[in-house]
Structures are given as C-alpha cells and as structure tokens.
Image: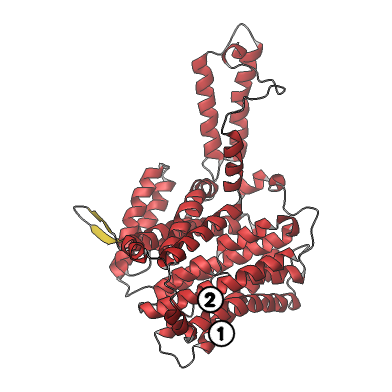
Amino acid sequence: MLGGVIRRFDPRERLPRRPLTNFVRPVQEFVQTESAGAVLLMVAAVVALVWANSPWRDSYEELLAVQLGVDLAFWSVEGSLHFWVNEVGMVLFFFLIGLEVKREITIGELSDPRVMAAPVIGAIGGMLLPLGIFLLVTQGASADAREGWAIPMATDVAFALGIATLFARRVPIGLRAMLLTFVIVDDIGTVVVVAFFYSGDVQVDQLLLTAGLVALMLLVYRLGLRQMFIFAGMGVVAWAAIHDSGVHPTTLGAVLGFLTPWRPPMPLDGFVRTARQLLERFRAGDEDPETPLGHDQVVDSLLSLSDLSSNAVPHVDRLEHHLHPWVAYLVVPAFALANAGVHLDPAGLADAFASTVTWGVIVGLVVGKPVGLVAATWIAVVLGAQRPAGVTWRGVWAIGLVAGIGFTVALFVGDLAYADPDLLRFSKIGIIAAFAIAGPLAFLGFRLLPKVEQARAPAATVDAPDTVAAP
C-alpha cells in the first residue's frame, strides 16, 4: 500500500533538531520580512559612505571603474561595473515595479476607483510640490543645475515599506493599502519621467526594433511557448536594442513587467478538478490492498501535482516570488554600494551646502513630499474621495513623512540628471542629508500612531476564483 512507500506522519512526532537550527531559523525569518531589504540597503549605503571616506577610497573608485564587456559576433557592449549595476541590474528593479503595478491594477488597491482616488491624488501632489520647490530654490542657477528637478519626486519603496513593517501593530489594513497605492503611483511617475525626460537622443530604428521584440514576446506567449529561457533570450536582445536607442533601459524593464500576462495557464477550477483526481488516486491506493501504488506511480503523481500547482499560479505572482529576493538582497544593495559613496571632506561639504541643488533636494524631499501628499489628499477628500477604512489624518502624515525618504530612486535619477561630477555630488549629499532628516521623522510618525487590534489582513482575504478571473 501507499503507506509502505510513504510512512504516515504522526503529528505528535518531533522532527530531530539540527545543530544550526537555532541560528538558521531566525535568519530565515528575518530574510522573509519586508524590513530585511531596507536593513540590507542601509548597510550597503553606510559601507559605501565609510569606504569612500576612508584611506582606501581609491580602491572604491577603482572597483567601480573595472571594465566588463560582452563581445558577440554581431554585437558587443563594454562598460564599468558602475554601468552594469545602473544600466542592467536596475532593469530588474524596474521590471519588478512593472509586475507590482500590473498586480495592483488587476486585483490590488488600484483595481477599485473608490479606494484608490485619495492616495492616487495624494501621490501626484507628493510629486508635484517637491518638483516645484526644487525649481523655486534653484531659481537663478544654471540650466544644468536645474536638470535635477525630478530627484525629490522619488520615494524609496524599500525604506517606506520597511518602516511600515517595523510598526505593523500600528498600521491598520487601510493605511497599509494607502501606502502601497502611493508607492505604486510614485513608481509609475518615476518610470514616466525617466522615459520621457532623462533619455538621450532617440534612435527611432532601434526603438522600433525594441517594440517589435516586445510584441514578439507577447506573440510567442500566445502561441503557448512558456519556457523562461526563450523570454530571457529575447529580453537580452531587447535590452541591447533599447540601449542603442537612447531610451534608458530601465524603461524596458517596467514595460515588460506591466505587459506580463496575468491569467495563469491553468484556470483555478481546472486545477482543483485535476488535483482532486490525483489525490483520489492516492486515497484509493492507500485504502485498497489489492491495488497499491508503487514508488514510480507515487513520484509520477507528485510531479504531476507539482506541475499543476505551478501552472495555476499567475505569471506575475510567480515572477515576483522568484525575483524579489534577488532584487531586494542583491540588485538594490549593489546599487546603493555603487552610488552612495560620496566623499564628505569639509571643503566639499561647504561647497555642497552653499549650492541651491543640495537645498532644493533637501527641502523638496523633507518638506515637499509630506506637505504635497497630505494637502493633495485633503483636497481629494474635500472633493468627495474617501480615505480607506481606519485611516486617520495622523496616519496620512506618517505616510507623507516616510515619502520624504527618496534614497535609491533619487540617487538613480540624480545619476541620469547630472553629467557634471560636482552637481552630482551636491545632489547625493542632499539626498543623504534628506534621508538623515526624513528617516527619524518617519520613524517617529509611525511610532506615534495608536496600536490597532489587527494591523494586517490575513492571507486568505483574497478570493482565489476572483483573482484568477481577473483580466
């Protein structure tokens, strides 16, 4: 019988403890939390700052300048390590953003216009006011200096969600939904700005080639070819095309993420029906001594069940599940390590704080983001929009304060905006200073929120059939 192949598990039995269990389990639990990525990002940024201001500063700059290249018979590209982190690694970051936007629009907070109105309008205000403040503060500066107008528009997703997770008992479901909606809209704004305002001279032929490759990916999927290596190969070719087009490659990542099909290959009702048949085979083989299941039959059924489960998961969720650890624990920390290393000598700091670029970034992030977000949300509510259930104005202010942390994306936009090394350094010092101010304020804002009985929704609140039926 099946019991002879797979021994029955007694729930009273305790699994043997391994020597490293006491160490490994807390580490695993930490890595699975949203705050882990924010902590690792912080560590990478601190390492970069310390390294860039240590006696080994030259080794930091030499590491980023190391040349790496790919040389094929028909195409080649070569660049520094800094180039590969910013131009290639960040494509995965924006691809993940595209996936999150697709999920939120399909079944998430952005799928209900009644819920999303206030945070969407608030997010727009949280982008426009910092932009206006930066342009006002830098009035009279050179045109090159004012190119960084989009730097204070950005919010760091990792830090925003990380801080909210640290205070999960004080963040009701509605406030968390509002924060998620805000950061998603903020991400969309960043993608649009990068695509339209921070790309070089556009080569139309290469851009058309990129669009054709994206269309080909969708066609291949429609034809039933789902092997990941096929799409990875076409994605690499599309990256090469858009890189040569003058449009920043991260735009491709966001577009591909958003265009990822939502519907899984197998509908949920088909999965349930087929899985029930397989499980019935297990039950019959276990109960009937005349027709026992052999080892090969057991393994074949288990593999079939595994394939069924895999095909019932929407591609957006599957890709998010597989990519999130790589992006959170490798790509984003590597970006911080490569971009946060600013030399902070006294003379350089004096020059930076005498520059309107630095102050435009600081005031835009620390003042413009929270005031713009809260004011726009208030206007939306006055005009008839509704705050999510359980969200107080104190909670909206907490979101506004955490929005002032624009670390990762702000550094990314600054690198695109400024070719002048001095202006780039001023913007980085402004971003770091804004983080030093906005971080504690955001921490305090969430700390002052009252505790709630249930801070987050249980995992089973999403109705699976509705999820699969979404377009």
Residue displayed at 46% across by 62% down: 336
Packing grade of label 1 (10 A; few <14, some 14-19, many >=20) is many
Q: Nearer the viewer, residue 199 or 87?
A: 87
| Left or right placement of residue 225 versus residue 466 in this view | left
Please determine whether, in this image, residue 357 is positioned above or below residue 332. Answer: below
Question: SS class of the residue under badge 2?
Answer: helix
Task: Locate residue 428, reporting x and y percent.
Answer: 46, 74
- Residue farthest to the top? 290
- Residue farthest to the front? 55
Tag 2 and tag 1, C-beta contact below 8 Å = yes
Please determine whether, in this image, residue 301 is positioned above or below residue 159. Answer: above
Question: SS class of the residue under badge 1?
Answer: helix
Q: Name the residue beneath numbered marker 2.
A: 152
Q: Nearer the viewer, residue 278 or 54?
A: 54
Where on the picture, by quarter, is residue 17?
A: top right
Indicate which disc residue 133 carries: 1
Spatial distance from mark 2 to mark 1, Cα to Cα? 9 Å
Identify which amino acid the numbered label 1 is placed on: Ile
Residue displayed at 29% across by 60% down: 66
Task: Locate residue 46, reporting x and y percent.
Answer: 49, 63
Identify which amino acid the numbered label 2 is placed on: Pro
